[in-house]
Amino acid sequence: MNNITTLSYEKPRFFTPGVWVITLLASVGLLSLLVRFIFGLGAVTNLDNQYPWGIWIAVDVACGVALAAGGFMTALIAHIVHGKGYKSVIRPALLTATLGYTFVALGVLTDLGRYYNMWHILLPKYWSPNSALFEVGMCVASYLTVLYIEFLPIVVDRFKGRVNLPGMLKTFNGFFERFLKILDVSLKKVMTIFIILGVVLSCMHQSSLGTLMVLASVKVHPLWQTPILPLLFLLSAFVVGFAMVIFESLIASKSFNLKPEVKVLSRLSRFIPILLLIYLTAKLIDMVTRETYVYLFTASLDSIMYWIEIIIGIAIPFTILMFEKYRNNQTWLFTAAASVIFGVVLNRINVYLIGFTPLYVDKPYFPAWTEIAVTVGFISLIILLYRFFALNFPVIEDMEN
Amino acid sequence: MGIERREFLKTLAIASGTLAGVSSLKASDKAKLNPDRFGVLSDLTYCIGCRKCEWACNEANDLPNQPLDSFSDTSVFEQMRRPTSEKYTVVNSYADKGLDGGALNVKVQCMHCENPPCVSACIVGALRKHPDGPVTYNASACIGCRYCIITCPFQIPTYEYEKVLTPQVRKCTLCLERTIENEQLPACVEVCPTEAIIFGHREELIDVAHERIKKNPDKYIDHVYGEHEVGGTSWMYLSNQPFNEIGFPELSDNSPAELTESIQHGIFKGFSGPIMLFSLLGIIMKVMKKEEENE
Ligand code: SF4
Ligand code: SF4
């Protein structure tokens, strides 16, 4: 952008060698996606009647929703509780959430056998309030809309006072300016409602993603199957929301050559140990109540995965972030955030895939390479789009002034 | 798990979506079922493993089929089979488990649960419990999420993964068209030469089953499988062997649908939970803003 000429800071170019690799991965993903839509689910997935859900649901959807929790967590802290000094992380978190949920929706669309019927969930005649999936679907659809509305001010900021259409279209410049001004003013008026709505919708579907697997009853391993799965999903979404904000902010500052915002992030990170403790307590009470500790030492894949989840996802980051000197250290902060994220991702995969045991299995599920390609491709696209928006829209404060 | 504990967990569960105080917990209204709804009783000790039911099912449902004589081939019994998208029912054989040391044959198909998890799961109501018993599927409503397959406690519904545009969920229909619309017997029941499967009103079949156990207590296991499993099923079994030894899952008497629906409704009844949360957040926001301005 040429209006920032007075600065010594120079925005990096869009393409770097790393970005080229990511672009390549995204292209392979898009090609696999094309094959899925031309030749059907059977051609690109290893899904079968024992494992009807694979990584597209477990990773793209279940993990995707959890990791996009940074959006509503920062909204909660910054806008609703009016915590001070968190302003700089709001827009990056919002961008991640918007991109994240967009791709959750695309992931669902890819996985649905009759994707063209997806709009049925909006038709009252098909409404099924008994279905947790219906609730998830409605909430994700509404929240996605809310996110786009919350994102609009960023777009308005970008073009306000700078509308400059080329050639023939010049005559419309004035019109668009006026339009943007009205949009700006009216958005400011109603934004409060959408911010609160976003938090409510998030709490609703983050937990319902847990309810979803409660209905799978005996098929989910007792280490994870519990009626309080919705509560556990909600609590872990809270934790991972903070972790994601820290994680992505540190990566962004590295890749855009900015000074890392350790101070803000360190303050944010104080919430993590508290939430981890609540999460762990709920998990333990549940374990004792249901007497599932008997499965802890069975040396099965399930018990190993459970332990990894607890140690890497909870114990390690909890310990690190208990100490102020580690919280103020960029490397430790990053390590703690990354391990929280790893833990929650593993938890979702455990609940949806590893802990999911069909009654009759003749072939265990392992994703086909095309399934992996689509998932990796979507993640790559998110990264590319994040980079594009961060470079061209007023998202990261330090890049603007 | 004791009742108290379950109640406790349920209460905790409800706290999850809302954190707001939702007090009442309402179990789902059970689907409206006719008192004289239909069912099938399968007496495994009568089954001779002729697999004629498989053939008749394929015929009745326009599934790919082979000549009837080819079904006397018993080599298929070497492996346990499951229903597929082209076969709504299969017979499995358990050697030495039958009476007098013979084989015990088990016909597998949709159980047509009384409170079916698959129906509770379906996001668009494509699966329905018919008041007369059958669990039906409406392909034109289906979005193909396959959540029904995830939740079926008997691992019954199958999917046409190889179809590009119009894949369907496939499973036994209890011959809805024949039985309810045309007062015929289900195709498998009609063809069975030994009356190992009988069709009738569910309540009467339960009486028949208990009667048989009472008359022959040495022959039968004292358990009518499906009378209570997951809240009861339309299809029920009698056996001379413990059911868990012949491929039947051990399930509780409650339908998983009851639990999830009470969680869902506890949180969302009249949108009370979300509305409370919304107001709570709104108030916090106002208060905090004031404080900020006062500073
Ligand atoms: S057996 Fe499975 S498919 Fe059949 S009604 Fe019960 S839950 Fe649905
Ligand atoms: S696959 Fe179809 S029938 Fe099954 S739950 Fe999804 S929409 Fe309903």
Image: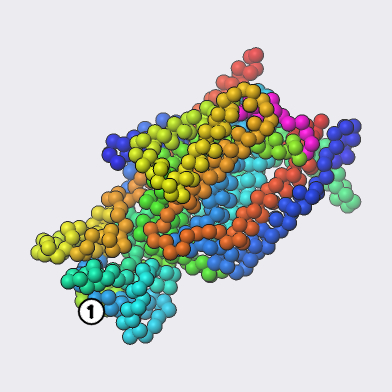
Residue at horizontal 73%, vertical 31%? A260
Give the percent coordinates (x, y) of residue A339: 58, 38
Circle 1 crowding by C-alpha within 10 Å: few under 14, some 14–19, many from 20:
some
Q: Nearer the viewer, residue A326 or A71?
A: A326
- Where, by quadrant of the figure, is residue A392 drawn? top right
Residue at horizontal 58%, vertical 57%? A109
Q: Nearer the viewer, residue A323 or A189?
A: A323
Element at label 1: loop
- Taking A47 as reference, is B71 left or right? left
Residue at horizontal 23%, vertical 60%? B242
Q: Is residue B40 magenta?
A: no
Give the percent coordinates (x, y) of residue A174: 83, 41
Label 1 near ligand 1 (CB < 8 Å):
no
Numbered marks: total: 1
Q: Chain of mark 1?
A: B
- Name the residue furthest left: B215
Residue under pointer 1: B193
Q: Nearer the viewer, residue B293 or B162?
A: B162
- Taking B181 as reference, is A333 left or right? right
Q: Is residue A30 above or below residue B18?
A: below
Q: Which residues are magenta?
A: A256-269
Q: Is residue B96 above or below residue A291?
A: below
- Where, by quadrant of the figure, is residue B294 drawn? top right
Give the percent coordinates (x, y) of residue A368: 57, 61
Q: Is residue B160 above or below residue A74?
A: below
- Taking B212 as reference, is A38 left or right? right
Give the percent coordinates (x, y) of residue B18: 46, 34
- Taking B78 as reference, is A240 left or right? right
Residue A200 visible, this angle: no
Amino acid type at image mark 1: Pro
